[in-house]
Amino acid sequence: QVQPRESGGGLVQAGGSLRLSCAASGAVFSIGDVGWYRQAPGKQRELVARTTIYGNIKYVDAVKGRFTLSRNNAKNTVYLQMNSLKSEDTAVYYCYVSQGRYEYWGQGTQVTVSS
């Protein structure tokens, strides 16, 4: 059973930084895409950043230049370094792990940016 678990969310002032981590027990990171999505109140879940097994990384335009995704396959962990945070980054952030045709989601971690 693959279970992603996020950590690192919290409350931060605008302009600050946070680093999210996601460790996925039971997963083999090297065989699937991993990444981060977010859902703000009243909005649909959206892609933040996602990386393939080949190392290609896709970012949503709103976070380009501010967020950096990295992965450690040996530790089955994916990170999201978030800098220059804005109030519009406030959302629940979800870790995503794919294993073949299966997708797994974490429970989410709240990120709140105060202006």
Image: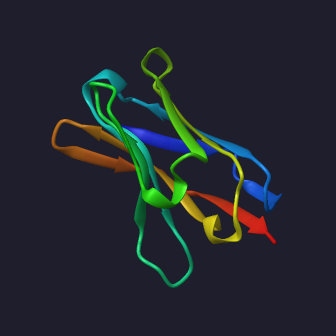
Question: Which quarter of the figure is the C terminus placed in?
Answer: bottom right
Query: Quick one: quadrant of the N terminus?
Result: top left
| Percent position of residue 49, x then y | 43, 47
What is the residue that sits farthest to the left in this orientation?
Answer: 101
Location of residue 44 (image quadrant): bottom left
Residue 76 versus residue 86: which sits nearer the camera? Answer: 86
**Of 83 and 7, which appears nearest the observer?**
83
Residue 96: x, y in percent?
A: 40, 47
Near-viewer residue (72 or 4): 72
Single out the residue that lies furthest toward the front.
65
The residue at the point 47 percent across, 80 percent down is 43
- Please indicate whether residue 88 sits to the left or right of residue 24 in the image: right
Residue depicted at 80% across the width and 60% down the height: 11
What percent of the width, then of the height, locates residue 110?
65, 61
Horizontal side, residue 91 vs residue 85: left or right: left
Residue that appears at 44% across and 58% down: 61
